[in-house]
Image (cartoon, rainbow, N blue to C red):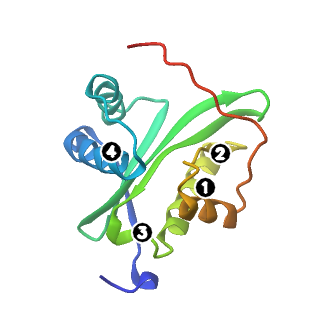
Amino acid sequence: MNATHDIALAFRPVGVSDRGLLEELVRAYYDFDDHEYEPGLHGPALDAICAGDPNVRAWIIEDGETVAGYLILTIGFSMQYGGRDGFLDELFLKDAYRGKGLGKQVMAFLETQVKRLGFHYLHLEVVKANERARRLYESLGWEETGCLLMSKRLVE
C-alpha cells in the first residue's frame, strides 16, 4: 500500500448496482464494531439507500480501483440545532486503511457535503470502546453534547 500521504480517497455515490457491495461492507463493519446484522431490519434500509432515499446520502470510499470503505449520512431536522442537520450514521474503513490518518480525509469530505446542504450541525455516535475513532473525532473539534442518545425499537 502507498504511504498515507499518497492515498487520495475518492467518494462515489452509492447506486442501485452497489446493493451487494454495500451489504458486504456493512456486515464487515458490524463484525468489527460488534453489532448484530439483521437481514429483516438492515436489508430494507440498504434497499432504500441504494434506491436513492432523499433522507440519506451514501458513498463508497475508494482508493483507485480498490474499495476502501463506505460512508452514510442521514438527514434530519432539529429545532435545537437550527433546522436541517445531519447524522454521520456509519463510517467504515477496511483494515488496510485504518490507523493511517485517512479518517481525516473522510471527515473533511463529509463536512464539505453537509455545508453544501446548508446544515448547521452534524452529529455522530461512537462506540465507547472505539478509542481510535473517538480520538479522531475529538481532534477534529467534535464534542460530547451532554445528552444521552436513547433509542426504542418500534418494529420486530
In the image, 21: left or right of 139?
Answer: left
The three-letter code of the residue at mark 2 reads Leu
Residues packed near mark 2 inside 10 Å, few (<14), some (14 to 19) or many (20 plus): many
- Disc 2, SS: strand
Contact (CB < 8 A) between labels 3 and 1? no
Q: Position of residue 78 (x, y in %)?
A: 71, 28
Label 4 sits on residue: 26
User: 134 or 66: nearer the eye?
Assistant: 134
User: 16 or 25: nearer the eye?
Assistant: 25
- Please tell me whether residue 45 is drawn above or below residue 67 in the rendered image: above
Q: Who's the residue at 46% across and 73% down the image?
A: 99
In the image, 96: left or right of 124?
Answer: left
Contact (CB < 8 A) between labels 1 and 2? yes
The three-letter code of the residue at mark 3 reads Arg
- Disc 3, SS: loop
In front: label 2 or label 4: 4
The three-letter code of the residue at mark 1 reads Glu
The mark found on residue 98 in the picture is 3
